Image (cartoon, coloured by chain):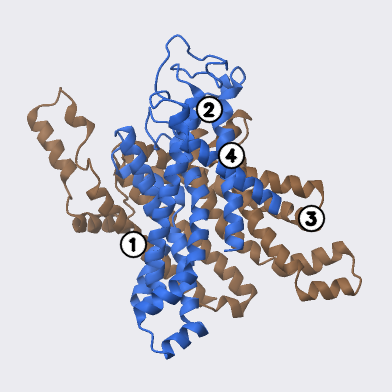
Amino acid sequence: MLGVLARGLSRIVLISLLAGLIGSVFVRLGPGFGVSAEDLDPRLSDATRAEIQRRNSAGKDVAAYYGQWLCGLAHGDLGFSPSLKRPVTDLLRERAGVTATEVAAGGAAGIAAGFLLAVVILACPRAVASLLCGLGSSLALSLPAAVIALICLWLDANPLWAVAAAVTPHALQYLTGVLSASAMSDHVLAARARGLGRSRILFRHVLTPVAGELAAVAGMAVSIALGASIPIEAICSRAGIGQLVWQAALARDLPVLVNVTVLLAIVTIGANTLTDMVIAARNPVRGSLP
Amino acid sequence: MTRAFTAAAWLVLLFTALACVAPVLFTRSSYSEQQRDFINTAPCARFPLGTDDLGRDRLARLVYGARTSLLLACVAALLATAAAALVGGAAGWLGGRIEKTALWGTDLFVSLPWLFLLLTVRALLPLDVSAGASVAITFLLLGLLGWAAPARVVRSRVRSLVASDFVLQARACGLSGTRLFLRHILPNVRPVLLAQFFVSLPLFVLSEANLGVLGLGVSEPLPSLGSLLRELQNYSMLSSRPWALAPAILLTSVVASLYALATRTEAQP
């Protein structure tokens, strides 16, 4: 358990540093670095324009910029957003809550819906309800998150339902596989042979052994929900991290993009580490495997 | 299952044929030609799906949009599969530090949400570019960023093959490294690569659609399934012009069919 935690923390630190470095390199190499709209303002004097260009081009050296970014990170200073004219720390602090709520609530609703649908498909595989569950899930899987957000907007529904709709088909796909494998295991066959009722077999012998797998779905759901939150927040006008990413991408606000890259890497790896810990706690032998 | 697969295969064939014959059905300029006398026309004999706000033929744009999305998703999937074969194959075959470095690289890519990665890297490239350049940028991006997950699958397949009995026997018979790789490992990895190619296709079509709706995909006037969906943001017009939903319906059918094919290919490589 502690080994899993230590491995997860070292992965978080290393991948975050790597993500920051790659982000910094891209920022410096991206076309248009050091150029701003202010350069075209006819009211500015040559001296002012030269000063702006000097300021914009400062830190062209990747190593110096990365060192500066790390130093700022250690002091809680993530830089300044040129497009929104505000410190990145403030922007992230204000918006993190909205996205966290959406991802947590939408992800949980998606997993719950996926789980219920998987149980329906497992319990009555030939019924019309199962067929409808499968069709609905395929439809949701085939729709881009942006279109799910548009549907949500038409229906005037809370955007977290759009996040749930994006997570549900993936959770259903995974859980159907896990439950089907569990339903075909030897102990279930033995329970059937001894004449146990269908519902007792389902709840006691099929669902209980795979409870730990729900943790694995949660880890997967965090990544899917975070990805889906970008178009959903952009289209539904929600002031979260997803909308910030979209605005930063359109405005080429590179300091915001580098910091959000690191933040998302930390959240995703953190969620996966927690998942690994839950699985390790339930099954120490499997959890200790590399 | 077999019926669904057959239906999906026929649909994919139909969409591909439609994409291929687009220049025969419509002239090359028909998707961008603006008929100022026919703005927002309802479906009629001349325009079976009506026209849009600029008087452009919706059907021509839909067919050309499907052509752009489908053909270029294939190119991007080929690129991603080739990169995955290279990275995953080298990692699995050579092992050691190369394998560890490749695993760190894939970890980094997989730890970031896919759409976020696409948006961020797309933002670092020029946004105000010609339609042709935007197509190349979008699908190169998909191909070059989509290799990580397939590379993991390829690596684990190569690792299991390296440890298998027949490879051990071939080594014992004195086969050289290159010959062993080309004659015994590569043919056995081919089904996995094929499955990864088919899995990437619907993912790339969906990703292009998401980028298109957010305004970071293929530029106007060239249509793609993603850029055609942007019109749906003005959802108040749907009650009077429901035929504007055609791109969403086509996209869903294409992706659902591709997913069905991918599932089947993955299950029985």
Identify residue type, mark 2: Leu
Determine the CA span between mark 4 and mark 3: 25 Å
Question: What is the chain letter for disc 4?
Answer: B
Q: Dot 3: few (<14), some (14–19), or many (≥20) neighbours within 10 Å?
A: few
Across and down, in percent, residue A192 comes to 86, 71
Residue A237 is at least partly visible in this image: no
**Whole-percent x and y of residue B166?**
50, 83
Same-subunit check for callouts 4 and 3: no
Any mark on residue A125, and which?
Answer: 3
Q: Label 1, secondary structure: give it.
A: helix
**Which one of the lettered chains is coloured blue?**
B
In the image, what residue occupies the spot 69% across and 59% down?
Answer: A176
Same chain, labels 3 and 1: yes
Same chain, labels 1 and 4: no
Residue bearing mark 2: B232
Q: Nearer the viewer, residue A60 or A136?
A: A136
Alpha carbons under labels 2 and 3: distance apart: 36 Å
Which disc, if any, is residue B244? none
Residue extending farthest top: B37
C-beta proximity under 8 Å, tags 1 and 2: no
Asked whether the beta carbons under mark 4 and mark 3 sit within 8 Å of each other, the answer is no
Q: Which residue is mark 1?
A: A17
Q: Residue at left 31%, top 38%?
A: B133
Gap in Å between the C-alphas at discs 3 and 1?
Answer: 48 Å
Provide the chain ID for the residue under circle 3: A
Colour seen for chain A: brown
Indicate which disc, 3 or 1, sits on the residue closer to the N terminus: 1
Q: Classify 10 Å Cα crowding around label 1: few (below 14), some (14-19), many (20 and above).
A: some
